[in-house]
Image: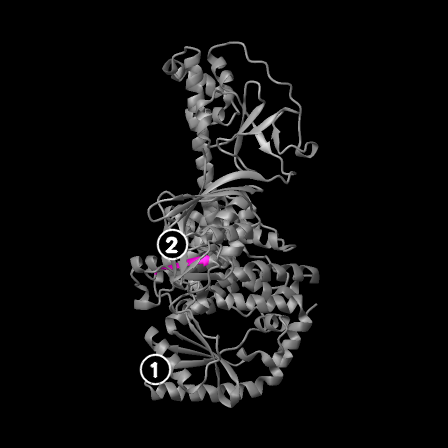
Amino acid sequence: MVPTSKHKDDITFEMVEEKVRLYIENEEQIKVIQEAYLFAKEKHDGQFRKSGEPYIIHPLNVAQILTTIYADYETISAGLMHDVLEDCDCTVNEMEEKFGKEITKLVQGVTKLSKINFSTENEYLIDYYKKIIVGMSEDVRVIIIKLADRLHNMRTLWAIPEDRQRVKAHEALDILAPIAHHLGIHKIKSELEDLSLRYLKPDVFYDIVEKLNKTKVERDKTVIDMQREVSDLLTEHHIPHEIKGRAKSIYSIYNKLDKGKKFSDIYDLLALRILVQTEQECYLALGIIHSKFRPLPKRFKDYVAMPKPNMYQSLHTTVFGVDGYLFEIQIRTHDMDEVAENGIASHWAYKENGGSTNTANLHSTTEQKLQFFKSIIDLSKDKMSSEDFVNSVKDEVLNNNIYCFTPKGDVIELPRGATPIDFAYAIHTKVGETMVGAIVNNNIVPLNYELQDNDIVKINTNKSSTPSKEWLNIVKATKTKNRIKSFFTKNDRDIYIERGTYTLEKELRKKKLSISEFLSDENLEKIFEAFKVDELEDLYLQIGNGKAPVNAVINVIHKGEEEPKPKVVKVSSKSTDADIIVSGIDKVKVNLANCCNPIYGDPIVGYITKGNGISVHRLNCHNLLSMDERTVEVLWNDNTNKRYLTSILIHTNTKDNHMLDLMQAISMVNVSVDSMNTVSKVDKVTYEVLCYVTGVEQLNKLVLALEKNQFVEKVERVMR
C-alpha cells in the first residue's frame, strides 16, 4: 500500500456555503443548496465510508470541489445528493417533488454512470467507456459531478484494497482525466493524473517528488528573479499585470521522462503565467518579453486567435531567461485564465452584477462553450457501429485537432491527418460531392495530401462531378466516410428502384395486366405482407436487386406457374478459380459485358442470356433497363488476380502533346496500356486509353495519379 496520510473529516457545510457565496448571491439558489445538504444528511444518516468517515463527508467534499470550478447551484445541489437515489431509501418522485425535475435529472444521470463497471483492459474498451459516459449524459453537468465524485474518491483511495486501488487509478487516468482535459477542467484533470500515478507507479511518483524537493530552492530563486525582471519590464511599458510561478504537474514530468528526456532537460519546470486585462495586451506583453528575452524557435503557440476545442486560450512561448535558464511563459487575460482552470463549468458562475447576469447572454456563452461536448453527443447519435464511434471519438474529439482556413479566413476544425476531401465535406456535403481538386497555400495538392495546422485550403468543384469510392481509403474523418458511403448507398438504391419499376411494369404489360389495377391499395397490402416491406419503393428495390423475383410478386395476386428454378449448388470463392461466382449455380459460362466492361470491385449483376451463359453487367449499365427480369445475383471472387480491360477518357486543357507524361503517370501505378488514341479539338486534346487494371481500387489510383498533372482537366471511365 502507498504510504499516505488520511484526510481528516474536518469539512463542514458552512465551509462549502462560504465558498458558494463568493460567486452565487441569489438567496433562493443558496436556500436550495442548504435544503439539498439537509436532505442528503438525513438520507445518509448512519452510513459510513470505508475510510471510517460519516458518509455525508463524501458529498460535502464533492460539493466543495464543484465550488472551485464555480459550478451553478443545481450542480452543487445534485453533487450533495448524488448518491441518495442509489444508496438510500429515496424515490425519484420524492426528489422531484422537493427539488424539481432539473436537479433530479442530474442526480439520475450520475446514478446511471455509477452503475457502470468500467474496464481499461485495452484501448478499445477505454474509448468505448468514454463513449458510454458521454452517450449517457444528456447534460454535461452530470459528467462534471462524476469527475468531482471520482476526484474525492481518489483522495481517499488508501481506504480500499491495493488491487482495487490500481483498477480505480487506471479508470481515472485512462477514462476520466482525458474527459476532464477536453472539458477544459485543468484543476481536476491534473490532480486525477497525479493521484493515479501515485497508486500505479509509486516508486516513480515519489522519485519525481524527491527530485523536485531537492531542486526546489534553486528553482524558486530563479523563478523569483525572472518574475521580477518580467514584471519590471511590463510596468515600464504601462501594462497592468499579475504574474504567477506555475508548478509543473508530477504526471506531466513523468510523461516527459517516459519519452526519454532527462530531468535536467525538462525546461518548463521553470514557468511563469502572466495575466493581463485585454487580448491586445496579451500580444503587447509577448512582444515586449521577446524584445528582451530571446525566444526558443518553434515553441510559440497562439491559442488566443485559435482556441483549443475545449475553449482554452493562451499565448505560449519559451524564452532564454535569467542565467540562461529556459522559461515557459503563458500569457492570457483573467477571463481566459478562469476558463483554462475551470473549463466549461465556469459558465454557471454568477459572479458579475451580483448574480444578475443576463440570462440570454449566459445561455449564448454556454452554447458556444459546450460545442466540444455536443460534437461527441452528435457522434453518438450518428448511425454508426460502436467501433466507428469509438474511432471517431478517439481520432476526432479526444485527440488534438488541426485548424485550417478557407480563403476567406473561416476556420475549419479537422482531425489530425485529414485531407482536402475532409475539408470540403466539413464546409458542406455538396462541396465534398462535387470537388475535383484542392489548392493548399497556393499550391495544387493531391486529394490524399495530409493537411497541416494553419493551411489555407481552396476547393475546386465541378457540378457534374461525383465522389469516388477510392476516397473512402483516403479520408480521415468518420463523418466524411459516412457521407461518402451514404452517397453510394443512395446512388445504388436509386438504380435498383428504377430497374425494379421498369421490370415490374414491363412484365405486367407482357402479361396484359393493368398496372394501375395491379397496384391498387388492396393488392399492395397483400404483396407488402408477402415480401415483408412497408412501401412501394421498397418493393421496387427488392425486385431491382433480385431479392424478389418479378413473377413471384405478380403471382401473389395472379396465381400462375412459377418458372422451374435451377438446381442450387452452394459455391464458395475457395472452391473455384473463376473470377465471377454465380449465386447458387456451379459451373456455368460467364462473360463480362462489353457495353459496360465491369472490373473487380464494381457493383455487378448477372443476366441469363439465351444460349450464351450469363452476361455480367455493372449495376448502373443502361442496357439493364431494356432487359427483362432474367437477372441473377453474382459476386466477384476475391481469390483471383486477374487484370481487366477498361477504357478511360483523359480530358486536357491544352493542345500540346502530353502522351509521354501520361504514359509515365500510368506506369507509376503499375497499369498496363493496351492502346492510347488522341481525339483533337480546337484548343484541347482528349486521350482515349484502353488499359488493364486489377480492379476499381487500382483504377481510382490511376485517376488520382493522372489528375495530379496540371494539364489534366478531368478523367472519366467510358461506358458504351
Residue 75, located in which quarter of the rendered image?
Answer: bottom left
> Mark 1 or 2 closer to N-term?
1
Q: Position of residue 660 (x, y in %)?
A: 49, 53
Q: Is residue 635 left or right of residue 441?
A: right
Dot 2 surroundings within 10 Å: few (below 14), some, or many (20 or more)? many
Q: Position of residue 466 (x, y in %)?
A: 41, 43
Point 56% across, 60% down: residue: 150
Q: Which residue is mark 1?
A: 240
Q: Pointers 1 and 2 in contact (CB under 8 A)?
A: no
Q: Which amino acid type corresponds to the residue marked 2 in the rendered image? A: Ile
Observer-nearest of 183 and 612: 612
Residue 514 against residue 392 in the figure, above or below: above
Residue 219 against residue 193 in the figure, above or below: below
Q: Is residue 10 left or right of residue 338?
A: right
Between circles 1 and 2, the one closer to the viewer is: 2
Q: Which residue is mark 2?
A: 459
Region in magenta: 410-414
Point 38% across, 62% down: residue: 442
Residue 621 against residue 119 in the figure, above or below: above
